[in-house]
Image: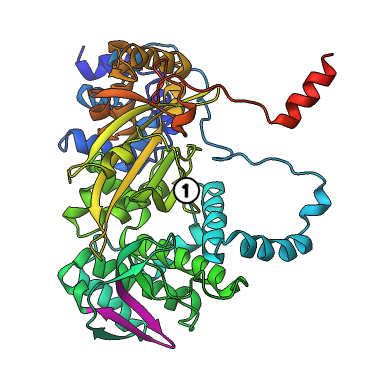
Amino acid sequence: MSAQQGLRRKAHFLGTKIKSLRKRNNLTLEDLSVRCVQIDADAGPSVSYLSMIENGKRVPSERLVEIIADIFQKDAAWFFDESLDDDAINTAPTAAVSGMPLEPGFLFSESLLQLAIPEMLAQTGTTGRQFAHLLIRAHQERNQNRFPDIERAADRIGGKHFPMRVDDVFEIARKLGLEIQWFDNSAFTDTGDDDLPFSTLVRSFFDAPNKVYLNNMLRDNPSRLKFDLANQIGHMVLHDGDGARTPQVSGGRVSGRRHDSDSLNVDAKDILYAWRDFECSYFAAALLAPKTPFRQFLARNSYAINSGDKIELTNTLVMRRMSSVSPYPHWHYFDAYPPGNLRAVYRGNGIPLPWGNMRLVSDPCQHWAVFRMLNSRSTKPSAQISVLRSGDDKRLYCCESIRSKDAAGNPHVLCAGVDLAPALQSQNIDPMETIDMIEASCNRGGGSAPIPLEARKQLDSIGKILNIGWIGEGAEKDATIICQRSSSCPRDKHCLGKPQPKLKPQIDQIRDALINT
């Protein structure tokens, strides 16, 4: 009997099992084909051939079974036994960050909020733009950073062409009737929203109805030039090139933001401009990195955060785009400036924040990877596995951070990360057991320590299934316990020494004393 005939006799459930694994991990047939080709270009199947295998019309070669087994971290013999897995576990987040019901409900009616919010912003010194960023972030997180209408608009204009050269983007601008004018302007010192000095560069701006001004300094940086022009193309496509658009600026304060010395009244344009900045930025990323080809590009490069260097895309675009195109939905992203200001944040995996873009906090946990990188001079990517403790809630994250400079020369840190618990759960591994195992090791090491062998094998397997190379890299390093505030450090050996007991407010002490007498 030939080997192929032997495979055919044992392959009753093989196609069903492959399809179940593929669906469980949110992969399309095209995704799985790319992953197979990535391992072995000669044995990798076409999309149509994979489809026939899943439908029982073809039996794969032994080599192809080995490849698929490697992708899903299964033993090859498992595909030929007569047992079927349980139904796939749904690990898709229903809401990345949970809200809370506020009562009485009538106080939160639309009419009252429109009266109260502008006054609240004015009295707290919060700009309309800052508040808009919070709203936009919540909108992104609720939609898992997927906006198909903007994707379709970008696909219609760019034809899903990938990768795009600088000349390709200029040709799109020409077809849309945009006039390009170059200007000379070097970086200058300004103050940011937190009144700290920042090097500031005006990169580009739009002049209605159809003129785009580009800074000559962009000529020497094709990746940033492509993004800025694509961003302005987005304004032409989405908003018909009207005049409601702020200049694109790196570094300090953007024109149109309220200064402390200005009127305390909230400028509604700030909110509109912030939303349009988001829409145009998302459009630019979708134009330069169309979903399907870019998803395949990331798969071929194991989600390396600096893989954009190969095709003239910025690290910022690559890392922000990961959360929009990855089949795994549990991502976060930070763009952090020293000493602790988030210019951009997305937390589709619900990660609590150590600080925000509204104000600095006095005691953020310094063990976050993004803080470590802020205080480093390295320009190489660095991965970290972290156990995050927030009260009784324990979570397990892996992130990769890289130190960079914006177009104005300001240092900042970009960080992309994933929640590992849903991936563990989807492989029928109890995530809390793994987290407890890693946390116990960290506490024995004073807060950071090597990951135990069993947990390291689990994480290495998860990294291969998700095809995110830096998960395995992080698992080889010491894991660390992190929290939101150093004063509430959850480590057995408290970061700040012996924690001070928290006293109840005096009013509560009086009340409790009277009740207990």
Q: Is residue 259 left or right of residue 404?
A: right
Question: Magenta includes 363?
Answer: no
Q: Is residue 214 magenta?
A: yes
Task: Specify the color scheme.
Answer: rainbow
Please tell me how crowded label 1 is: few (under 14), some (14-19), or many (20+) other residues with Cα within 10 Å.
some
Q: Position of residue 375 (x, y in %)?
A: 25, 42
Question: Which amino acid, by three-letter code, is at mark 1?
Answer: Gly
Magenta-drawn segment: 201-215
Q: Nearer the viewer, residue 388 or 151?
A: 388
Left or right of 457? Residue 440 is right
Quadrant position of residue 66: top left
Residue at 58% in and 75% down: 263
Residue under circle 1? 356
Residue 254: horizontal and vertical position, in percent? 41, 71
The quadrant in which residue 184 appears is bottom left
Residue 299 visible, this orientation:
yes
Which quadrant of the figure has residue 20? Answer: top left
Secondary element at tag 1: loop
Quarter of the N terminus within the rendering: top left
Determine whether, in the image, residue 133 is placed left or right of residue 423. Answer: right
